[in-house]
């Protein structure tokens, strides 16, 4: 995946463009001029210390924050889906009902069933959310996002509450889904290995700005990238 992020213009080829994004809560500046471009189909992972503003940036891109100052969010596509750490399923609706919620098309059910099959949950359409494991609930959340064919998928630590083995399975699933649907992705994570494994590009947010930006993916030396990212996050491995 090409990741041309040079220049200050906004080439129409970008799915997302952010310029000098600022967000404060009271006197406290959280985002102090964030610049970010994401190409169509590009997978970007966002790392940063706790409280540095990762979720704040994601909420701004999702249109969930009406108080973002200035014109920092220059471009986001109309079709945006968001996945959070908890699945946020409606407990009183079936799995299929959750996936198709709000869809008005005549073929919504068929699309919902297809999406559930894609995430490995064929046959569980009539189950209630509480009958599913945490991993399965996150699969439903992914199906609910992708059935809307988003141009941009925003994911805020979507696997943060899962055990290590389930998380690895979800990584493989997310890779498959992204390859099939080709949305641009911004994944917020605390997990450096998750970022390196999944993303085409990794950025580190610090002091309200993008402090480091590195290409990841095939052909990149993951070991040295891991060291560089950990150092940027203030973690220095024991010799
Ligand atoms: N609605 C709000 N009102 C007041 N302060 C807020 C609000 N939302 C976020 N903040 C503050 O902004 C800062 C950044 O929060 P944010 O949730 O974006 O960080 P984060 O990098 O996602 O953190 P974490 O990795 O711990 O989830 C924090 O200090 C937080 O307390």
Image: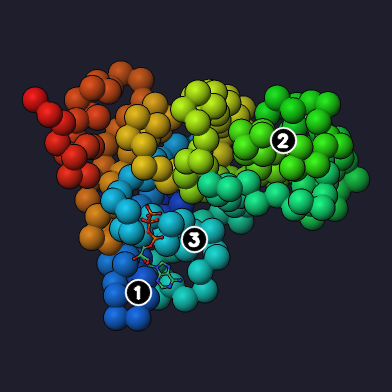
The percent coordinates of residue 224 (x first, y second) are 19, 25
**Disc on the earlier residue, 1 or 3:** 1
Rendering quarter of residue 217: top left
According to the picture, the residue beneath numbered tag 1 turns out to be 24
| Crowd tier of the residue under label 2, counting other residues whose Cα lies within 10 Å: few below 14, some 14–19, many 20 or above | some
Q: Left of 161 or right of it: where is 2?
A: left
The percent coordinates of residue 179 (x first, y second) are 56, 27
| Crowd tier of the residue under label 1, counting other residues whose Cα lies within 10 Å: few below 14, some 14–19, many 20 or above | some
Q: CA distance from mark 2 to mark 1?
A: 39 Å
Figure colour scheme: rainbow
Q: Quadrant of the N terminus?
A: top left
Residue depicted at x 30% and y 49%: 48
Q: Is residue 86 visible?
A: yes
Ligand 1 within 8 angstroms of badge 3 C-beta: yes
Q: In the image shown, does 90 or 43 lie closer to the viewer?
A: 90
Q: In the image shown, does 3 or 132 lie closer to the viewer?
A: 132
Q: In the image shown, does 99 or 63 lie closer to the viewer?
A: 99
Q: Is residue 103 visible?
A: no
Checking the image for residue 221, the label placed there is none
Q: Is residue 177 above or below residue 11?
A: above
According to the picture, the residue beneath numbered tag 2 turns out to be 132
The percent coordinates of residue 234 (x first, y second) are 17, 44
According to the picture, the residue beneath numbered tag 3 turns out to be 59
- The furthest residue to the left: 239
Q: CA distance from mark 2 to mark 3?
A: 27 Å
Asked if the residue under mark 3 is in contact with the one under mark 2, i.e. CB atoms within 8 Å, the reply is no
The percent coordinates of residue 5 (x first, y second) are 31, 45
């Amino acid at each position: 995946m090409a990741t041309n992020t040079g220049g200050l213009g906004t080439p129409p080829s970008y799915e997302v463009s952010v310029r000098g994004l600022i967000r404060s809560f009271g006197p406290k500046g959280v985002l102090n001029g964030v610049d970010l471009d994401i190409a169509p189909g590009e997978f970007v992972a966002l790392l940063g210390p706790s409280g540095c503003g990762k979720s704040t940036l994601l909420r701004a891109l999702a249109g969930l924050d009406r108080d973002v100052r200035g014109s920092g969010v220059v471009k986001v596509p109309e079709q945006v889906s968001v996945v959070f750490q908890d699945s946020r399923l409606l407990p009183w609706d079936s799995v299929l009902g959750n996936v198709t919620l709000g869809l008005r098309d005549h073929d919504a059910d068929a699309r919902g069933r297809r999406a559930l099959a894609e995430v490995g949950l064929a046959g569980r359409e009539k189950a209630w959310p509480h009958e599913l494991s945490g991993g399965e609930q996150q699969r439903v959340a992914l199906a609910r996002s992708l059935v809307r064919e988003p141009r941009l998928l925003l994911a805020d630590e979507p696997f943060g509450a899962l055990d290590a083995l389930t998380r690895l399975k979800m990584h493989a699933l997310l890779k498959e889904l992204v390859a099939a649907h080709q949305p641009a992705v911004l994944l917020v994570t605390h997990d450096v290995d998750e970022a390196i494994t999944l993303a085409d590009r990794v950025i580190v947010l610090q002091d309200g700005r993008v402090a480091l930006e590195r290409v990841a993916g095939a052909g990149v030396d993951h070991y040295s990238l891991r060291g560089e990212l950990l150092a940027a996050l203030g973690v220095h491995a024991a010799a």
